[in-house]
């Protein structure tokens, strides 16, 4: 049988339950699902040290008071672990969790049905909570503060409102756009956690843990190469790791070397800065076709053949954050770092554009 990058492990003499909680090594030959990449306890969550300390205190206090904790709002860019933290909170409290999302709730009645079926202490996780319909938001205000819902019976002038008392529960809301939440809804969360992008050092630890869970043998330096290309985002890091796993399996590698990571991700057009095909196309368009800018969003999106919303929401945030791009009143401008990354020399001083 050909060797591959899946590490062989010996679990003899080890308590399986403790192994599941504290070890990243898969048990036996059971297939490992991607869901198992999520840690189940707060101590196993890598990164966000200040947030973890705050959340640990918050949960410990609730356990000592023997009451469900206040409602929690998790805010931050996609892929940083908001859903994972919600699952961890329910697991730490040893209570069930009900999962839904803002777009899935079309009417206030949908939310009322969910709320009325909750048990005492249960966690209700609402992903993309900023996309709740207005009527559902107003229903949620009362449920979160007074633990009751008003159910309308009948229609027209004869309609009556029947108040239903709810058991005390905890709402965990996740949002990528905290500013879109109405102030009355934000005010009802007792704890707001802001997740930040990960530094490369923390991403390396996360990649090493995920590699152990998936049984991938990463040679020294391979996790560094993956972390450099992961845009500070755990979700992207795990996705790239799975593509490197595919490369290792197809090429029958016993260990994934740093050069293997570079070759595998070059196949997917991901460079050392984590820029993909579309990112490079945007920078090339600004530098080569507009002499570094400024260029308007519509012209730029037409040049790269993408919708303007895709360029604005998918590409620009990372390019601006990493210093490749500047947004000015006159349009988008490529920085000296962008010119250098493309192997070109700036023709003009961009500072005169401000």
Image (cartoon, rainbow, N blue to C red):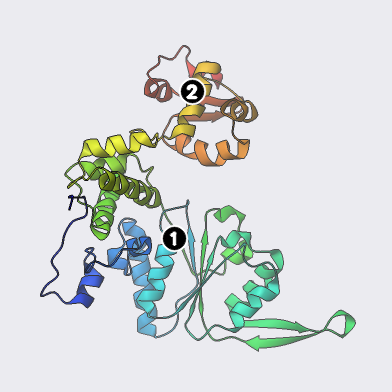
State the residue position of label 1: 82
**Kind of element beneath mark 1:** helix
Residue at left 59%, top 25%?
303
Q: Is residue 206 above or below residue 278?
A: below
The image shows residue 56 at horizontal and vertical percentages of 34, 69
Name the image quarter holding residue 155.
bottom right
Q: Residue at x 51, y 80 (%)?
A: 169
- Identify the residue at image location x=60%, y=63%: 102
SS type, badge 2: helix
In the image, taking residue 331 as reference, residue 246 lies left or right, namely left
Q: Is residue 262 above or below residue 195?
A: above
Q: Is residue 333 above or below residue 151?
A: above
Image coordinates for residue 135, horizontal then vertical, percent: 71, 68
Q: Nearer the viewer, residue 218 or 287?
A: 218
Residue 309, located in which quarter of the rendered image? top right
In front: 244, or 283? 244
The furthest residue to the front: 1
Q: Quadrant of the C terminus?
A: top right
Residue 153 in picture, x, y percent from top left: 78, 85
Picture layout, residue 250 above or below residue 57: above
x, y percentage for residue 176?
Answer: 52, 54
Nearest to viewer (mark 1 / mark 2)? 2
Identify the residue under disc 2. 284
């Amino acid at each position: 049988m050909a060797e591959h990058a899946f590490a062989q492990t010996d679990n003899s003499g080890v308590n399986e339950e403790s192994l599941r909680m504290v070890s990243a090594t898969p048990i036996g030959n059971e297939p490992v699902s991607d869901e198992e990449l999520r840690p189940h306890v707060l101590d196993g969550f890598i990164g966000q040290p200040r947030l973890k300390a705050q959340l640990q205190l918050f949960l410990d206090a609730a356990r000592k008071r023997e009451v469900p904790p206040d409602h929690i709002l998790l805010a931050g860019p996609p892929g940083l672990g908001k859903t994972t933290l919600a699952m961890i909170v329910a697991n730490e409290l040893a209570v069930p969790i009900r999962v839904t999302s803002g777009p899935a709730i079309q009417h206030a009645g949908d939310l009322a049905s969910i709320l009325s079926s909750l048990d005492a202490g249960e966690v209700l996780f609402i992903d993309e909570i900023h996309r709740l319909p207005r009527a559902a938001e107003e229903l949620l205000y009362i449920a979160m503060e007074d633990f009751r819902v008003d159910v309308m019976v009948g229609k027209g002038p004869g309609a009556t409102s029947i108040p239903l008392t709810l058991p005390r529960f905890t709402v965990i809301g996740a949002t990528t756009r905290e500013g879109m939440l109405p102030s009355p809804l934000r005010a009802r969360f007792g704890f707001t956690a802001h997740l930040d992008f990960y530094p490369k050092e923390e991403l390396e630890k996360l990649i090493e843990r995920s590699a152990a869970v998936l049984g991938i043998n990463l040679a020294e330096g391979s996790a560094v190469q993956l972390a450099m290309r992961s845009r500070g985002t755990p979700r992207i890091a795990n996705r790239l790791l799975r593509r490197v796993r595919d490369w290792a399996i197809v090429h029958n590698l016993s260990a994934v070397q740093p050069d293997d990571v570079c070759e595998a991700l070059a196949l997917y057009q991901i460079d050392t800065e984590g820029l993909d095909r579309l990112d490079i196309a945007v920078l090339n368009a600004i530098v080569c076709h507009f002499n570094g800018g400024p260029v308007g969003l519509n012209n730029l999106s037409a040049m790269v053949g993408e919708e303007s919303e895709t360029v604005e929401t998918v590409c620009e945030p990372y390019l601006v954050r990493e210093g490749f791009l500047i947004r000015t009143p006159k349009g988008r401008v490529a920085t000296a770092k962008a010119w250098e990354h493309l192997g070109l020399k700036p023709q003009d001083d961009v500072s005169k554009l401000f």
